[in-house]
Image (cartoon, rainbow, N blue to C red):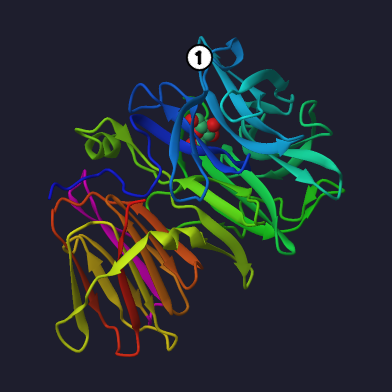
Amino acid sequence: MEKTLKQQYHLEPIHGLLNDPNGLSYFGGKYHVFFQWNKFEKDHSYKEWGHFESSDLISWEFRGSAIIPDQNYDKNGVYSGSGLVIDDKLYLFYTGNNKENCQRESKQCLAVSEDCKTFLKQGVILHTPEQFTEHFRDPKVFYSDKKNCYFMVVGAQRRNGKGAIALCSSNDGRQWNYKNILATTEQYEMIECPDVFQLGNSHVLLYNPQKRDNILDSSLYSFSAYKIGIFDELNEKLDFNDLDSAFSLLDYGFDFYAPQTFLDEKGRRILFAWMSRMEEEQEKVFSNGVSYIHCLTLPRELFIENNQLHQRPVKELYQLLGNDIPLIVESESIKKVELKESAFYLHIQDNACMQNVYISFHRGQTAIEYDPVKKQIKFTRKNWVANQAEFKTCNLEFLIEIEIWADNSSVEIFLNNGEKVFSSRIFALNTEEDIVLKGLTEKTIIEIKEIISK
Ligand code: FRU
């Protein structure tokens, strides 16, 4: 069988380039996932919002363009933003980007839909407050019961060239006022795609610190972080406003960025992220011969346990699991699985704590291993540009569960009930697959299943 990069059960564009998830919402009985889309090229030269719709979070319908850059204030890009149902309509907040003679202008904008088929632009709702440069974008809007108003957090850069998160508020979602700076960084030049929400009795802040060259106006590197604490809605203050200290990574893999969450009709806090941190050269080689690039992560439900954010695949995804794939026992501690497909589900549970576990797939190109002495997990994949192995690690006190969702060209690994996650694209060259499992005992429960197409 031909090896394919095309994903079986992840959201990816029909052609062109996808980046951030936008406007995540549940409206009119459907889940809506909008996304940053360049429908013309596999690069970042054009940005609009594309649209996917689903009634169950597993079968998705592509609905084409939702918001396109056709106004002066957004002509150089309909950038990222969020969605919220207000007065039975879906309000979509986004950043309109205008760049003339290398001068950047950012405007926070609104489009409203009654049916999720047409999206009517309402124009600019907020100009950049004087405290910030024009790196002011990615509005995330939510409702505050306590204050009985809408809040908007915006990723920003202060006049001193360092990053921040700005807070704005509104009584109706249309008239917005800038309130204050919620949090700052002295180490990063920009914060992209912030998100604040309540989870249990705490609040979670998701943010993406970005290192920039302010003179060249170019991005150097960035990653996704989170902090847990309290957002005092009445006083409009975060009790954890230093973005440089005591943060945790949201994901330990190679490809994860710009996560966004929403509350669904069942009260779940669900996250999607862009599954990429590829450099240009990686993008080029990865998508050589196909007309599309990048995908989103699986939808994940969030919860807090032991003051750590946990992510678990939403329960609907388990409907995708098909037949069991038989295990071949090679020796007491080595087991093997022969696979016809690259997409598979693997679940390993051992409440007595796993020791030196090693699992490899894609004929050894991709692997995960646990070192119980160092208390460390190591994930290895093959870098398709350098053509050699590269790895990422994270600390883990103990290991009782490994859950792997592999698609044709990605893998998401959830450890200990989603306490730590590794998300990465993979570029497997072999047409045949195998999984090798080492170091498991007879008490370990191993489940390997096919993933069916919906
Ligand atoms: C994050 C980001 C956002 C911006 C969008 C443009 O990946 O840079 O800050 O709105 O992408 O596509």
> Residue 141: image x %, image y %?
70, 39
Q: Quadrant of residue 317?
A: bottom left
214 w.r.t. 5: above or below? above
Query: Going by the image, does 383 lie left or right of 73?
Result: left
429 w.r.t. 448: above or below? above
Query: In the depicted view, which residue is nearer to us: 123 or 392?
Result: 123
| Residue linked to disc 1 | 102
Magenta stretch holds residue 164: no
Query: Going by the image, does 359 lie left or right of 354?
Result: left
**What amino acid is at disc 1?**
Cys
Q: Is mark 1 within 8 Å of ligand 1?
A: no
- Give the secondary structure at mark 1: loop
Q: Is residue 135 visible?
A: no
> Residue 254: image x %, image y %?
37, 52
Neighbours of disc 1 within 10 Å: few (<14), some (14-19), many (20+): few
Query: Going by the image, does 206 lie left or right of 173?
Result: left
> Residue 287: image x %, image y %?
25, 36
Query: In the depicted view, which residue is nearer to us: 438 or 160?
Result: 438
Query: In the depicted view, which residue is nearer to us: 362 or 53?
Result: 53
Q: Is residue 191 visible?
A: yes
Q: Residue at x 40, y 84 (%)?
A: 350
> Residue 402: image x %, image y %?
39, 72
Query: Going by the image, does 58 lie left or right of 197?
Result: left
Q: Is the magenta region chiefly helix, strand or loop?
A: strand
Residue range in magenta is: 372-391
138 w.r.t. 251: above or below? above
Q: Residue at x 71, y 50 (%)?
A: 241
